[in-house]
């Protein structure tokens, strides 16, 4: 009887040790899978923010540091464009325009929300969500966290160039994941790779053509 109990205890211990070993191996794999999936969603939203900022700059000559201003622009503004009336190879059409004393250019307006995001169409509700970091409500307080966004002007060759940045720290969208693995990730990004520990687009201190750190 005593030997049987010992064997059962040893079996339980072995199963526990095997599970612990398996879990210790799989934990980084699960963490990386979650990180990559969430990074993809965050990057997609940052790309939308960048598109909105570029449209705002096209109209206003500068970027904005306010999500309220940016979202209101996307929802209410109209943008003006130009298009050719006839092809530059259409000699007959060009002659007719010249005879009518018309330029081969037509101006037209489009709602900002209908043109800024290309083939990807955002609803007004989705535009309202631009400010929020995906999965940021997975932390302890369950509240959505806004992207950190700013706008500035930097001197490039004696020319004042508008710049902006939008970023989300890993702590904002991986808060519910393995804490030690998250700490290790942040430490690697900051101290080994010397880069922002998260997803970032643009820079407030230099002109980067609004590049993202994932590109």
Image (tube, grey):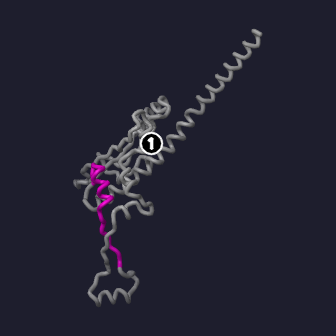
Residue at image mark 1: 135
What is the x, y in percent for residue 83?
A: 35, 75
Seen as rendered, the residue at the extreme top is 2
Quarter of the image with the N terminus in it: top right
Q: Name the residue at 22% across, 54% down.
A: 158
Residue at position x 40%, y 58% in the image: 123
On screen, residue 147 above or below 187: below
Placement of 100 over or under 78, stated as above or below: below
Q: In the drawing, does residue 215 fall left or right of residue 112?
A: right
Residue 199: image location, x then y, percent: 41, 44
Q: Is residue 67 magenta?
A: yes
Name the foreground residue: 74 vs 87.
Answer: 74
Please state which of residues 46 and 140 is positioned toward the viewer in this rendering: 140
The stretch in magenta equals 63-84
Point 37% across, 48% down: residue = 201
Q: Is residue 203 magenta?
A: no
User: How many numbered markers are drawn?
Assistant: 1
Instruction: Name the spot of residue 111 as percent of width and height, x first.
Output: 33, 65
Name above or below for residue 96 compared with residue 62. Answer: below
Q: Is residue 22 left or right of residue 212?
A: right
x 41%, y 46%: residue: 213
Q: Could you say which is closer to the camera, residue 177 or residue 129?
A: 129
**Helix, strand or loop at mark 1:** loop
Q: Quadrant of residue 160?
A: bottom left
User: Residue 115 location in percent, x, y?
Assistant: 38, 64
Instruction: Assess disc 1: are there few (<14), some (14-19) or many (≥20) residues with their C-alpha within 10 Å of its C-alpha.
Output: many
């Amino acid at each position: 009887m005593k030997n049987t109990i010992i064997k059962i205890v040893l079996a339980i211990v072995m199963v526990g040790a095997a599970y612990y070993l398996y879990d210790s191996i799989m934990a980084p794999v699960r963490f990386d899978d979650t990180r990559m999936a969430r990074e993809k969603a965050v990057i997609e939203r940052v790309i939308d923010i960048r598109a909105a900022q570029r449209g705002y700059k096209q109209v206003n000559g500068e970027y904005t540091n306010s999500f309220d201003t940016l979202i209101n622009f996307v929802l209410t503004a109209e943008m003006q464009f130009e298009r050719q009336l006839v092809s530059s190879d259409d000699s007959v059409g060009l002659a007719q325009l010249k005879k009518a004393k018309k330029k081969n250019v037509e101006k037209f307006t489009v709602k900002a929300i209908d043109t800024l995001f290309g083939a990807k169409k955002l609803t007004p509700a989705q535009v309202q969500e631009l400010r929020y970091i995906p999965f940021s409500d997975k932390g302890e307080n369950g509240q959505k966290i806004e992207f950190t966004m700013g706008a500035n002007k930097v001197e490039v060759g004696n020319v004042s160039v508008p710049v902006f940045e939008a970023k989300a720290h890993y702590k904002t969208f991986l808060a519910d994941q393995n804490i030690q693995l998250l700490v290790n990730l942040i430490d690697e990004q900051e101290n080994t790779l010397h880069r922002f520990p998260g997803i970032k687009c643009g820079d407030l201190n230099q002109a980067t053509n609004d590049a993202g750190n994932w590109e």
